[in-house]
Amino acid sequence: MSDYLSSWDILIIGGGPSGMMAAAAAAGEGDLRVALLEKNSSLGCKMRITGGGRCNLTNVATSDNFFSNIPGNAKFLIPALSVFSGKSCIDFFRKLGVSTKVEEEGKVFPVSDQANDVVEGLKEYLVRKRVDILDQIKVSELIVEQSVCKGVVTENGNRYFAKKVILATGGASYPATGSTGDGYLLAGMVGHSIKNAIPGLVPLVFRDSNIAKNVQGISVPKATITLLKGNKKHSTQKGDIIFTHFGLSGPAALKISREVSSLVNQGDEIILLIDFFSENKDEELLNKLSTLAGQQPKRKLLSILKQLIPDRLAVLVFQMLRLDLDKNAGETGKVVLRKIIDYLKKFPVELSGTRPLKEAMVTVGGIATKEVNPRTMGSRLIEGLYFAGELLDIDGYTGGYNMQIAFSTGWLAGMSAKESIS
């Protein structure tokens, strides 16, 4: 082991949104020695690509709506969000010179539409607060003596000591940005339970790739998708969907993906029902198709259906129902028309699962929240150890919720560590 030794009051591991915010809170008025360790060559690598490079900071949803968009352990976040809310986040970045704007569904972005402005604004704040930013340093072990965390050991054997240590290493999604699950290993080595990490906010994969390829690129607004476990309804989401060469993406698919990932882990057969006309009742849609067929009896029924849905989707429906592509609308009875409508309202697709964790926007799973004090983010097992961000078994839907989780838990961890020293 190297003889290199150094010490701080507070040591934060991970330079993502939760780690940077923890450092900001811990530094306070600059009266404590705070260090931020990052294994990449720069801070905020994942932040720079979120929101399509625009960085969806938070959401202005009401408290109830906010929590309804956090399917993973929302109650655990009540203290953190009460200390550092979405409004707190907007005010904080405004003071850093990063003005924000609110877009559809309450999403908050920087006015510049540049994620780099958010990262650099936060980094400049840390520099002003005299936080020691140490990059290209990977932590391989926590130093724990008699159930008290005293510091860390780096990959090259250096020992960094601190009165308090905050783990904010992120999950295991987008590993190219540095989120490679290091924190799970570190926490597990000192006795923490880790809930199996699975993909969240990730596209779905069809078992039959031909279905996907036939409708690749087609988007459907305001669809409703329903996940079946066996023959029973498991969960439902409504929103835009986009067919890809492997399956389904878009907001609704991403939201339901955590449920798909969970069922895959259980080995269940998964069927997805797609309602292409969720805002129309069955009879209303049947009357519409019947009227079009009655007005154009000599046209092929396929051509009539193409007036309601994209051409390639109409062809796929005919193929799946084994209907005659050349049959005229006037030769078609209401039984066939109803069969088509039933199919459009409950279009069945068997799923093989989701895209891999490395392509997911967020990790579902992580450090068990029962082992963490929600009022401080402190470990219930190891004194002086705190957690923040995606490393915890908490996750939200798209729309700025996950970023706010990172900021709130990071701020609370940093403040708690600081106050425990004071």
Image: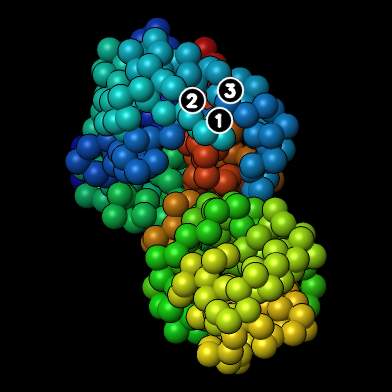
**Disc count in the image?**
3
Question: Residue 106: which disc?
Answer: 1
Task: Name the residue nearer the viewer: 332 or 262.
Answer: 332
Residue occupying image coordinates x 31% and y 40%: 53
Q: Position of residue 234 (x, y in %)?
A: 74, 65
Asked whether residue 218 is in view, the answer is yes
At label 3, the amino acid type is Ser
Residue occupying image coordinates x 45% and y 65%: 218
- Mark 1 element type: helix
Closest to the camera, between mark 3 and mark 1, is: 1
Q: Are marks 2 and 1 in contact (CB under 8 Å)?
A: yes
At label 2, the amino acid type is Val
Q: Is residue 339 left or right of residue 387?
A: right
- Mark 3 element type: loop
- Mark 2 element type: strand
Question: Residue 102: which disc?
Answer: 2
Q: Position of residue 248 (x, y in %)?
A: 49, 66
Query: In whole angstroms, how far apart are the C-alphas of marks 3 and 2?
Result: 15 Å
Query: In whole angstroms, how far apart are the C-alphas of marks 3 and 1?
Result: 14 Å
Task: Name the residue nearer the viewer: 283 or 363.
Answer: 283
Figure check: 250 above or below 304: above
Of mark 3 and mark 2, the one earlier in the sequence is 3
Q: Position of residue 72 (x, y in %)?
A: 65, 48
Q: Residues within 10 Å of mark 1 (few under 14, many from 20)?
A: some
Query: In whole angstroms, how far apart are the C-alphas of marks 2 and 1?
Result: 6 Å
Q: In terms of image quadrants, where is residue 68?
A: top right
At label 1, the amino acid type is Gly
Q: Residues within 10 Å of mark 2 (few under 14, many from 20)?
A: some
Q: Residues within 10 Å of mark 3 (few under 14, many from 20)?
A: many
Q: Is residue 378 left or right of residue 217?
A: right
Question: Residue 85: which disc?
Answer: 3
Task: Name the residue nearer the viewer: 231 or 72.
Answer: 231
